[in-house]
Image: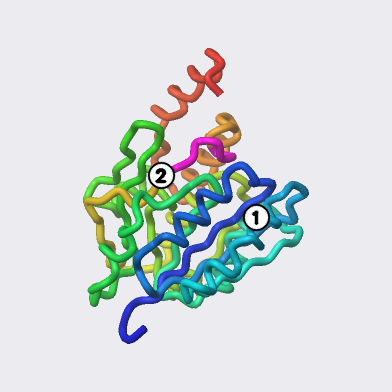
């Protein structure tokens, strides 16, 4: 592939037969030519693994490395760590089941002629008719909340040094980003004015409001950063009104 950067796309899933196909096809249909795709399944008992197997030949035809495992794990953080350990790419992005790339040229647009060496490249996600956008001062934003991991590419070098904390079952990405800030100085971060992916709202963080904020508060305290209570208020109202 010459000097093209290798992009590792990792999907973690469990009993995802209803959503995994869209995620897989969004990777398969990318026009960028240097991708590896890794799926980490938590030993699903539905048809998720059967669906994963169906795509093996299709990825082979596209000359895309397609690597998957299905086994018990210790939660999402453990699955993330397994995927990162298997990744060989210059950059790694987690695109979980139910998420999918915004359009087929997004990786090509971002990395076809990329020669700059950034630690983190982050953009926008589309969430059910809304834009989730990180301000250009990403480092400040990471202290307040976090970039969307479905739109964030992190260098493999960081994943070699920093792992996801198995203590956290929902906000492991929030903890991870803050841990990166704490442990790596002079981060080179690039914000891109593009939507990278669609974010599925049926994930664990969207359906566990109180535990979501409980972990978020604990993590904020751990790193001595201010927690965003406005989200707590909004989610509490949603819960009371039954908007789950």
Is residue 222 positioned above or below 36 on the image?
above
| Magenta part, dominant SS | loop
Q: Position of residue 45 (x, y in %)?
A: 77, 49
Quadrant containing the C terminus is top right
Q: Residue at x 28, y 75 (%)?
A: 117
Judged left or right of residue 191, residue 51 is right
Label 2's element? strand
Q: Is residue 74 magenta?
A: no
Residue 9 locus on image (x, y percent): 48, 64
Residue 8: percent from left, percent from top? 46, 69
CA separation, marks 1 and 2? 21 Å
At 43% across and 47% down in the image, what residue appears? 224
The residue under the point 49% across, 77% down is 88
Question: Which residue carries the number 2 mark?
Answer: 198
User: Which callout, 1 or 2, points at the residue further toward the start of the chain?
Assistant: 1
Residue 98 badge: none
**Mark number displayed over residue 51:** 1
Q: What SS does tag 1 mark? A: helix
- Callout count: 2
Q: Residue at x 58, y 32 (%)?
A: 207
* Residue 38, above or below 192: below
Residue 97 horizontal/vertical position (percent): 56, 49
From what the image shows, is residue 190 above or below residue 124?
Answer: below
Does the magenta segment cover residue 202? Answer: yes
Left or right placement of residue 75 versus residue 149 in this view: right
Nearer-the-camera pick, 225 or 145: 145
């Amino acid at each position: 592939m010459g000097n093209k950067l290798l992009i590792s796309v990792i999907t973690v899933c469990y009993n995802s037969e209803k959503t995994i196909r869209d995620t897989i096809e969004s990777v398969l249909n990318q026009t960028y030519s240097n991708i590896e795709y890794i799926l980490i399944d938590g030993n699903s008992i539905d048809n998720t693994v059967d669906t994963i197997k169906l795509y093996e030949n299709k990825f082979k035809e596209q000359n895309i490395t397609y690597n998957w495992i299905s086994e018990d794990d210790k939660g999402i953080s453990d699955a993330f760590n397994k995927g990162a350990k298997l990744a060989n790419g210059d950059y790694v992005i987690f695109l979980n089941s139910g998420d999918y790339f915004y359009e087929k040229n997004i990786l090509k647009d971002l990395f076809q002629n990329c020669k700059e060496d950034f630690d983190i490249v982050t953009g926008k996600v589309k969430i059910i008719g809304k834009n989730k956008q990180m301000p250009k001062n990403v480092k400040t934003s990471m202290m307040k909340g976090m970039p969307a991991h479905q739109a964030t590419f992190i260098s493999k070098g960081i994943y070699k040094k920093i792992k996801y904390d198995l203590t956290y079952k929902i906000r492991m990405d929030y903890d991870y980003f803050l841990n990166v800030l704490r442990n790596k100085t002079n981060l080179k971060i690039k914000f891109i004015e593009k939507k990278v992916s669609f974010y599925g709202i049926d994930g664990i963080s969207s359906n566990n409001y109180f535990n979501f904020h409980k972990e978020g508060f604990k993590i904020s305290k751990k790193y001595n950063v201010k927690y965003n209570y406005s989200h707590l208020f909004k989610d509490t109202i949603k819960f009371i009104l039954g908007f789950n």
